[in-house]
Amino acid sequence: MPAHLEATRETLSMTAPSGLREVVAGKTGLCSIDGARGRLLYRGYDAVVLAEKCSYEEVVHLLWDGDLPGRARLDYIRDQLAAARGLSPAALDVLRRGAQGGDPMDVLRTAASALALGDPDAADRAPEANRRKAARLASGIACAIAAFERLRRGSEPIEPDPELGHAADFLRALTGKRPDATQERALDACLTLHAEHGFNASTFAARVTASTLSDLHSSVVTAIGTLKGPLHGGANREVMAMLESIGDPARAEAWFREASAAGRRIPGFGHAVYKVDDPRADLLRRISKGLAEAEKDPRWFAISVALEPLVKRWKPLPVNVDFYSASVYRYLGIPSDLFPTIFAAGRIAGWAAHFFEQCADNRLIRPEAEYDGPAERPFVPIEERRA
Ligand code: ACO
């Protein structure tokens, strides 16, 4: 290795493990995860308890403003999110084009970018401006997903109903039907369970963008692109495809035997941080069971519970958040290719909170890489190159 590269290597204190596993890449006051015990806290509150007892708006307030809101502050954030519903002409234009066969996550990523066009605070990086933009993005993302779904089915987007809470109006705009209390509670809990999860891939990507002093919309667009992959937020869609291909609980064992023999990865299992079951999965399992009973359609829940022990007997893999969210979304009448976008609609709360936190104490995120390419060599003129 050339001397100058040796010297560079010596200045590196260590080479991080593959995938940055167990590397502490910074501080956050937003969320703590105990992967060994399967615990997830948002600013000290158990996230599962929040999902059972709070509305998504309360959790947004907790993450953005530091604590759970009292009545007056809850009214304030509810009104702020409700007033921000609706889409700019630029975003609607993207959605109309995207509705002609676009992948939902590609369209959402582009629509989130278009939401910056026409945002009165687009270029303002002051904390109050970022807070206003975050509210517009949280509502705008939900509206964009719902409008996309309507447009691709040949209908026009549904006008927002400011009397409804965030989850209920999102589901109404998406499905065209006012949800009942069980459905509303289910989506509300899902949004909360997906709201925040530390330095996961999409949030970390958002923080890297924030650290360059770029803007909130750019951070969110970065995050949506990162969330899309099947190893992250795209897994819920893969879970549904798997449940559909199994088709019947009685087929779960035969399907699994074939999949495991082929060495396939089973979506919805395994996690970079949790060594035991993801605490969110337990509540999602209960929600899925409740919806299966309410909808009198046990199939998707029954296939899921038939598969879970088979996978766990095969490998010590924890069940993750995506496994039971698939059947929950299906019971709520959401098409499976939209599942990753529902994840984004919840996670916008965490992405924005991390953006605020990064901005409040910023230093450019810029790690080193350990070079393992060819040693330094003389330049070769094009006439002398072989290929
Ligand atoms: N099915 C089968 N085997 C698995 C699975 C799985 N779902 N997950 C991990 N493994 C196995 C791997 O094959 C590997 O085995 P090997 O050492 O014999 O090759 C071993 O477990 C370790 O795998 P890694 O990919 O190194 O584990 P890592 O912790 O990096 O992966 C990940 C975490 C990406 C989530 C992985 O478990 C996975 O691909 N799961 C399926 C996709 C999924 O559900 N993603 C959503 C994650 S949660 C979220 O992002 C919201």
Image (cartoon, rainbow, N blue to C red):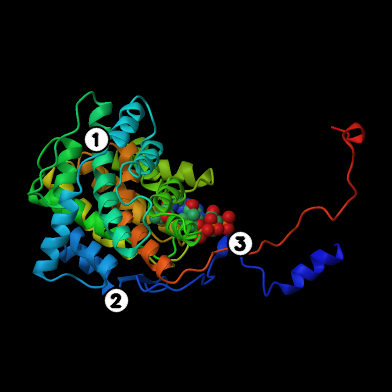
Element at label 2: loop
Label 3 neighbourhood size at 10 Å, few (<14), some (14-19), many (20+)? few
**What separation in Å lies between label 2 and label 3 (alpha carbons)?**
30 Å
**What separation in Å lies between label 3 and label 1 (alpha carbons)?**
40 Å
Q: Could you tell me residue 278's position as x and y percent?
A: 36, 63
**What separation in Å lies between label 1 and label 2 (alpha carbons)?**
35 Å
In the picture shown, does residue 289 fall above or below 58? above
Q: Which residue is mark 3?
A: 18
Q: Is mark 3 within 8 Å of ligand 1?
A: yes
Residue sitting at x 33%, y 55%: 347
Identify the mark at residue 387; answer none if there is no mark: none
Closest to the observer: 325 or 45?
45
Q: Is residue 290 visible?
A: no
Q: Is residue 348 visible?
A: yes
Identify the mark at residue 147; answer none if there is no mark: 1
Residue sitting at x 20%, y 26%: 155
Q: Mark 3, mark 1: which one is toward the viewer?
A: 1
